[in-house]
């Protein structure tokens, strides 16, 4: 019995010793793992900070929100057109056009506004294009073009309404004496003769087919006698418009694994390069030295950090391309001085406070070192280029 008790005591002592050893080892393991994760998190945080600092060099600064009020009509501000120090803003929910004096670009002043009435077709005005003393407005709800006389911005007059046969007016651009319209819902492009602005007439209609890549067309660019149409579902169509009444298919740049045009939405041209913004593929640059054969030379894929998720529009000014994004809620400044190697230099995101208008960034326009950003909010944002 004493022998058994002694053995029991010895076993009990050994058990406590092993328990202490195990606890000690567990503590060491926890400390080691904790240190590892702390270091990993620290490194990731530092890397993130370095990435942010590499493109947040205070080269652009958000300076002002221009908000809808009793004087200004900016409900659903969508698209801009600029001429002679006047800013024209389409307002989707105000069903009209706001005109502002931007002699001081940082401080737009209300000049006038014009709204849909019994004599016009202006429900959900989406796009605007200027020609001579006239503004051509695209109505998404009325499926129509409304012509306004803007010779006196303080006293705008309705001129003509043209009911159209297709839906989903998105992009509108004027080249020569023709208005080009993209119907994103009906995979169709129309060319309107506006040589007499008071009596616009449809010249020709083009629809997506086995040859032409016009699925969900969004926007136009013009280089010489060529029109480039960016498509939301197919890529980029190139048309010979030397005779606008008889445009001819030249080529199509199809979206694929090597061409970043999936969800193509906005584009701009500078020199021999086209710059694109795509909902899926972010930002890309195409060399058009041969205008019939655009070649992609660079792209920047969208990430959570770079502000290019759902890139919607791009405007090029000098050596920079400015891209706005709907999901990234940002304006992104990209150095394109070397088109083969674009570099993000700075980015500003909407802070979620409701005081900024970078949320759902949909349209961007640069003017005299200022950037105007609209996203179907109740106003628009102004960003200053500091460099």
Image: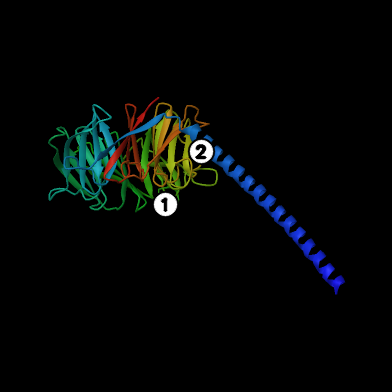
Identify which residue, 344 or 212, lies in the foreground.
Answer: 344
Label 2 CA crowd tier, 10 Å (few <14, some 14–19, many 20+): many
- Look at the image and tell me whether residue 142 can be seen: yes
Circles 1 and 2, Cβ within 8 Å, touching? The answer is no
Q: Residue 304 at what x, y percent from top left?
A: 48, 45
Visible residue check, residue 298: no
Total number of numbered discs in the rendering: 2
Quarter of the image with the C terminus is: top left
N-terminal of the pair, mark 1 or mark 2, is 1
* Residue hosting label 1: 209
The residue that label 2 is drawn on is 299
Q: At which x and y percent is residue 221?
A: 37, 37
- Furthest-right residue in this view: 3
Which residue appears at 34% of the width and 30% of the height?
A: 384
Marks 1 and 2 sit apart, C-alpha to C-alpha, by: 28 Å
Residue depicted at 46% across the width and 39% down the height:
283
The kind of secondary structure element at disc 1 is loop
Disc 1 crowd rating (10 Å Cα; few below 14, some 14-19, many 20+) is few
Q: In this view, does 160 lie to the left or right of 77?
A: left
Q: Which residue is drawn at 21% across and 41% down?
A: 97
Considering every residue shown, the one lying at the far bottom of the view is 1
Which numbered mark, 1 or 2, is in the foreground of this view?
Answer: 2
Vertical arrangement, residue 6 with respect to residue 43, above or below: below
Residue at (22% x, 38% y) in the render? 135
Work out which quarter of the rendered image holds the N terminus and state it: bottom right
Outermost residue toward the front in this view: 2
């Amino acid at each position: 019995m004493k022998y058994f008790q002694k053995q029991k005591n010895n076993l009990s002592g050994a058990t406590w010793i092993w328990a202490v050893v195990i606890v000690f080892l567990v503590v060491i393991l926890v400390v080691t793992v904790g240190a590892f994760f702390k270091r990993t998190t620290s490194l990731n945080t530092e890397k993130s900070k370095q990435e942010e600092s590499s493109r947040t060099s205070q080269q652009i600064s958000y300076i002002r929100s221009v908000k809808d009020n009793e004087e200004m009509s900016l409900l659903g501000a969508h698209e801009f057109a600029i001429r002679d120090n006047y800013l024209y803003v389409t307002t989707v929910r105000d069903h009209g056009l706001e005109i502002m004096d931007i002699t001081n670009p940082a401080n737009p002043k209300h000049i006038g506004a014009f709204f849909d009435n019994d004599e016009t077709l202006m429900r959900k005005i989406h796009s605007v294009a200027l020609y001579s003393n006239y503004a051509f407005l695209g109505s998404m709800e009325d499926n129509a073009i409304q012509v306004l006389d803007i010779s006196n911005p303080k006293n705008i007059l309705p001129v003509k309404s043209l009911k159209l046969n297709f839906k989903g007016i998105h992009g509108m651009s004027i080249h020569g004496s023709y208005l080009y319209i993209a119907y994103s819902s009906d995979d169709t492009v129309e060319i309107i003769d506006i040589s007499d602005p008071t009596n616009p007439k449809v010249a020709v209609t083009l629809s997506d087919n086995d040859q032409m890549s016009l699925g969900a067309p969004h926007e136009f660019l013009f280089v010489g006698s060529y029109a480039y149409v960016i498509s939301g579902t197919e890529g980029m169509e190139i048309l010979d418009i030397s005779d606008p009444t008889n445009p001819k298919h030249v080529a199509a740049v199809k979206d694929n694994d090597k061409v970043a045009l999936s969800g193509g939405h906005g584009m701009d041209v500078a020199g021999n390069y086209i710059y694109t913004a795509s909902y899926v593929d972010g930002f890309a640059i195409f060399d058009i030295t041969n205008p019939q054969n655009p070649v992609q030379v660079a792209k920047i894929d969208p990430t959570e950090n770079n502000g290019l998720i759902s890139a919607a529009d791009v405007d090029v000014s000098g050596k920079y391309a400015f891209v706005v994004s709907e999901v990234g809620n940002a304006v992104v400044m990209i150095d394109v001085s070397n088109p083969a190697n674009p570099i993000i230099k700075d980015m500003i995101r909407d802070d979620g406070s409701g005081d900024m208008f970078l949320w759902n960034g949909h349209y961007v326009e640069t003017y005299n070192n200022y950037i105007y950003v609209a996203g179907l909010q109740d106003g628009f944002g102004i960003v200053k280029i500091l460099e």
